[in-house]
């Protein structure tokens, strides 16, 4: 059994206990080198054709991390006006923001129009609303390629059972609405779901989307979405990383075919979120109690489902490493359930998991917490959201979001 945090020197000489004592427990910790490496891998995905990576910022919207993505040359997706404003705050020019909303108001669409931000509409109704707001404008449309994939039904965003996008049998109506308001369809985009390790569904969706693209006039861009998987079982099962090398070759063949048949080369895009920051973030927490109940052993931590929602929401797996006296514990393994401190029976991080012997006072390190971790955190049970810190390339630790205070809980009340 190996240790991921040892293998990659995640903490760069910083003692996790010192971090918790200084910044509070629990604590999100990010490694700058891992993040930059993954961002560069994404940005270099396609080299033969004009290509850009749009980071899908819903995965992690920390302002400092957005600035790192900007430094590495990535553009960004936004799903809401709030995300647009954060990207602007991070320094993104409006022409490097792609707004991909779902079921939003006239007010929110108007904000994007006023800021001259390219917007994708994912229904005929939303396209009609956009036309009323911005007659003669340029926009994109989100299409459903008929293929979905992802780690859970709740995150599959294409295919037959989804609320997203416009299907191929609606294209005639789409063109009528576009003509009605003199809209220029500048691009098309898709997103089939989040976290796939097998590229086959994605490549099939690419094939389908490129066929649909032929129905449009010459497009400025085609965006294939994201969803590239992360090996969440890297410690427990030695799961391998997503095979980008072989994936690129198959992806490029499909682009070759389209360019040859269509007679022009648009800008190609993808919009990954999880892959960018997931492995570069861990969540540290403290074991406050160990107990037995009906023959089962439980380790009670301060990492409640308000801090990390994915295991409760999706039944997601996160590998866990146990730290004691500054070292990762690997031996004396046992079956144990690791829970949080929220008043819910579903508040479980790891259910009946084989882990090293855990004692009260130990530190648990939840791996692959950099995406959809803090972004989905809440103050449920009036618990405070944790701080976020970045371990910079030189090993320095920098706070990139302070821990909540109790005053923050009272801030927006009117009494």
Image (cartoon, grey):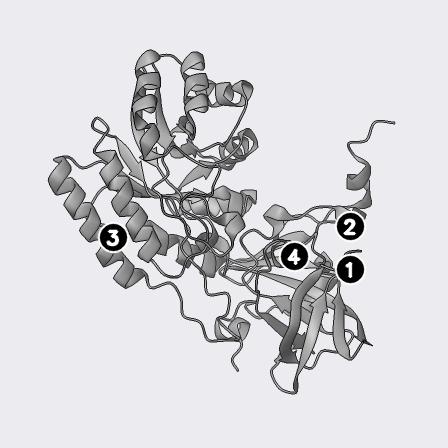
Cα separation, mark 4 vs mark 1, equals 13 Å
Q: CA distance from mark 1 to mark 2?
A: 9 Å
Q: Of helix, strand and loop, which one carries label 3? A: helix
Which residue has dot 2 on it? 383
Q: Which quadrant of the rendered structure holds the C terminus?
A: top right
Looking at the image, tell me whether mark 3 or mark 2 is earlier in sequence order: 3
- Pointer 3 local density, CA inside 10 Å: few below 14, some 14–19, many at least 20: some
The quarter of the picture where residue 353 lies is bottom right
Q: Earlier in the sequence, mark 1 or mark 2?
A: 1
Nearest to the eye among marks 1 and 2: give it.
1
Is label 4 in contact with label 3 (beta carbons under 8 Å)?
no
Q: Secondary structure at mark 1?
A: loop
110, above or below 84, in the image: above
Residue under numbered circle 3:
251
Dot 1 alpha-carbon crowd within 10 angstroms: few under 14, some 14 to 19, many 20 or more: some
Q: Please say if 325 is above or below 243.
A: below
Q: In front of the other: label 4 or label 3?
A: 4
Q: Are marks 1 and 2 in contact (CB under 8 Å)?
A: yes
Q: Earlier in the sequence, mark 4 or mark 1?
A: 4
Q: Give the spatial CA distance, label 4 vs label 3.
A: 34 Å
Residue at the spot x=42%, y=18% of the render? 128
Q: Nearer the viewer, mark 2 or mark 4?
A: 4
- The reply to whether residue 97 is visible in this rendering is yes
Mark number for residue 341?
Answer: 1
């Amino acid at each position: 059994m190996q240790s991921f945090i040892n293998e990659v020197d995640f903490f760069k000489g910083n003692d996790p206990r010192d971090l918790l004592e200084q910044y509070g427990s629990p604590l999100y910790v990010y490694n700058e080198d891992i993040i930059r490496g993954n961002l560069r891998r994404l940005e270099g995905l396609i080299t033969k054709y004009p290509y850009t990576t749009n980071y899908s910022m819903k995965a992690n919207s920390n302002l400092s991390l957005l600035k790192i993505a900007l430094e590495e040359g990535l553009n960004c997706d936004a799903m809401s006006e709030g995300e647009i404003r954060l990207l602007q705050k991070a320094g993104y020019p409006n022409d490097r923001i792609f707004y991909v909303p779902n079921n939003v108001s006239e007010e929110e669409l108007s904000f994007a129009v006023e800021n001259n931000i390219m917007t994708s509409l994912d229904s005929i109704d939303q396209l009609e609303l956009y036309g009323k707001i911005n007659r003669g404008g340029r926009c994109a449309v989100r299409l459903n390629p008929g293929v979905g994939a992802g780690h859970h039904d709740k995150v599959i965003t294409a295919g037959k059972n989804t609320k997203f996008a416009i299907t191929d049998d609606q294209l005639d109506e789409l063109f009528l609405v576009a003509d009605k308001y003199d809209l220029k369809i500048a691009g098309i985009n898709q997103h089939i779901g989040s976290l796939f390790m097998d590229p086959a569904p994605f490549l099939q969706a690419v094939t389908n989307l490129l066929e649909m693209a032929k129905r449009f006039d010459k497009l400025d861009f085609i965006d294939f979405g994201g969803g590239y998987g992360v090996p969440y079982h890297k410690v427990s099962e030695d799961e391998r990383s997503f095979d980008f090398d072989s994936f690129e070759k198959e992806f490029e063949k499909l682009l070759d075919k389209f360019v040859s048949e269509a007679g022009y080369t648009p800008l190609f895009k993808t919009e990954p979120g999880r892959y960018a920051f997931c492995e570069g973030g861990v969540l540290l927490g403290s074991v406050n109690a160990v107990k037995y109940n009906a023959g089962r052993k439980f380790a009670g931590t301060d990492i409640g489902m308000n801090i990390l929602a994915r295991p409760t929401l999706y039944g997601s797996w996160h590998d866990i490493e146990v730290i004691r006296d500054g070292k990762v514990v690997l031996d004396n393994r046992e079956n144990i359930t690791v829970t949080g401190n929220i008043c819910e029976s579903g508040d479980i991080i790891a259910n009946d998991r084989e882990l090293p012997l855990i004692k009260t006072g130990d530190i648990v390190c939840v791996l692959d917490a950099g995406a959809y971790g803090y972004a989905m955190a809440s103050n449920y049970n009036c618990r405070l959201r944790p701080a976020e810190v970045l371990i910079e390339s030189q090993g320095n630790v920098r706070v990139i979001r302070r821990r909540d205070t109790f005053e923050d809980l009272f801030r927006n009340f009117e009494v």
